[in-house]
Image (cartoon, rainbow, N blue to C red):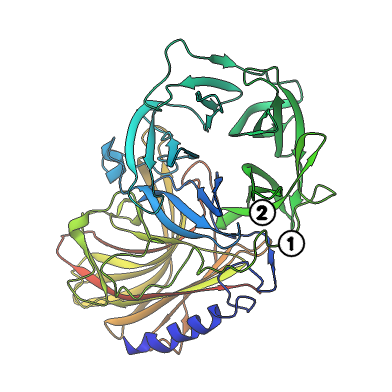
Amino acid sequence: MKARLFYSLFIGLSLSCSSGMFAQSSDNGDGTFTNPVLWADVPDPDVIRVGDDYYMVSTTMHLMPGAPVMHSRDLVNWEIINYLYDKLDDKKSYDMIDGTVYGRGQWATSLRYRDGKFYAYFSPNDTPFRGYVYTTEDPAGEWTLLARIPHFHDASLFFDEDGRTYVFYGTGQLRELKPDLTGVLEGGLDKKIFERDSEENGLLEGSRVIKHDGKYYLIMISWPVGGKRRQVCYRADNIAGPYEKRVILEDAFAGFPYVAQGTIVDDGKGNWYGVIFQDRGGVGRVLTVMPCRWVDGWPMLGDENGHVPEIMNKPVQGYKSEGLVVSDNFDEDNLKLNWQWNHNPVDSCWSLNEKPGYIRLKTARVVDNIFLAPNTLTQRMEGPRCSATVSFDVSAMKDGDVAGFSAFNGDAGILALSCEGKDKYLAMKSEIVSLSNDKKEVTDVKSSTIEKVKLESDHIYLRIDGDFRLHKDIATFYYSYDNKNWEKIGSDFKMVFDYRRFFMGTKYAIFNYATKTQGGYVDVDFFDYKRIRE
């Protein structure tokens, strides 16, 4: 464990200078921040303010625990404080049995606050097509499943001033719920509040609703005929309509695609901000924060020219954060909240106390590829560049076991440690998964070994660097026996975002699985991470 000490101290020093090359946050340390405020996969955001605190939820689909709850005091420095749930268990496919839920699971959660309680609604984008309502008095504490109500696509809960409760969803659908959110209100309002006009093409999605100066504002994304993704707003004096429409943001940013889908939120002092995501290829869908200017009663997003600013003043001064992706020495009794498992974990097959200071990953099931391996542990990758090192002790691997470190997505670049008889090897591999449309079953994995070397020691360090700058999306792979002298292995790997499979950005992933018999394990000493801002 001594080998990690200098590296961890080095990262700690770099974090202390928020404007430095290795700063984890987009906070520039001079009262400004640089967009994207989170250059990581944070799609489908919903943000609310309660007093001086901002809370945000996002989509994590097949990762567990799911539906991360994040907190900020300035809309710039965010930290994960909790998740809505530890596991979903509606179907065996959440356990990667009889299919998977890659690209499905939890989507587009709506977050609201009323009378001292927080409420969150989401509907898994898979069977049985029912929604979950969770509630709590403390968003950092335990969330309780309040009710299962019908499926509403990309929904937004809304509490009106008269005590009535609604859900906006789909392309302009409005439904009244029971005031306690336990179901649909029988005889309540059920209406399509607008019809898509000839300018629009396909669905309008990502509903987010606010009420401002007595008017109702429904903010959505659209793909106009022959045009680019954009943010639109539907406005009405009455919740049931009639609604009028205006385009409130239509802007590409920093050479990447157009920015759209999210919400607006105020600071309680008359200032408003848009929190909107942008697709950025292999890293996923990143978060931007921008001014929201009320013009003739419309929430116009961006600067005075309608553009997402690259650098702008922080909404609130004086706050910092560690960032969404963090190093971990596995010295605590619990995993840091930044970690998520790929599907539901097998809890009996991982431990933080069997070898203190390490996480032990035991083989949980005999499978033949990483896409079916239980207990794959993940964190986000970040742009513009990032680097992470993992320390492995592989002395207890059994014949046929495969462990390692991956830039993990539907196209995965992998550093694979394999036990083959009495010998162990390291290979840099590319693995590309095919999934069925119905059950998301793994139907094929195209595997290509780029380079393979025999291990000289049972203790090895693996490193993956990610480059998400414009036109890059490249992962590079290294190994070392002393955490100082590094050897590049294999070739550069192109990371991709594919909505038909994982529908999320590439993740760092630590894994261990058996291809022959169970019983082996690996011990992971640390995960050391840095985000490189230059």
In the displayed structure image, the side of residue 442 where residue 278 appears, left or right:
right
Asked which secondary structure carries label 1, the reply is: strand
- Between 69 and 286, which is closer to the camera in this rendering? 69
Query: What residue appears at the point 48 percent right and 14 percent down from the top-left corner?
Result: 188
Q: Is residue 19 above or below residue 229?
A: below
Q: Position of residue 23 (x, y in %)?
A: 58, 74
In the displayed structure image, the side of residue 76 where residue 2 appears, left or right:
left
Give the Cα separation between the discs numbered 1 and 2. 9 Å
Residue 410 in view here: no
The quadrant holding residue 88 is top left
Q: Position of residue 416 (x, y in %)?
A: 36, 68
Q: Position of residue 480 (x, y in %)?
A: 40, 84
Query: What residue appears at the point 39 percent right and 60 percent down from the top-left corner?
Result: 378
N-terminal label among 1 and 2:
2
Residue 150 in view here: yes
Q: Quadrant of the N terminus?
A: bottom left
Query: What residue appears at the point 29 percent right and 82 percent down from the top-left corner?
Result: 459
Q: Which mark is residue 534?
A: none
Q: Are marks 1 and 2 in contact (CB under 8 Å)?
A: yes
Q: Is residue 181 above or below residue 384?
A: above
In the displayed structure image, the side of residue 183 where residue 156 appears, left or right:
right
Asked which secondary structure carries label 2, the reply is: strand
Q: Position of residue 299 (x, y in %)?
A: 74, 39
Query: What residue appears at the point 70 percent right and 73 percent down from the top-left corner?
Result: 30
- Between 422 and 302, which is closer to the camera in this rendering? 302
Q: Amino acid at mark 2?
A: Val
The quadrant holding residue 46 is top right
Q: Amino acid at mark 1?
A: Met
Q: Is residue 245 above or below residue 510?
A: above
The residue under label 1 is: 312
The residue under label 2 is: 289
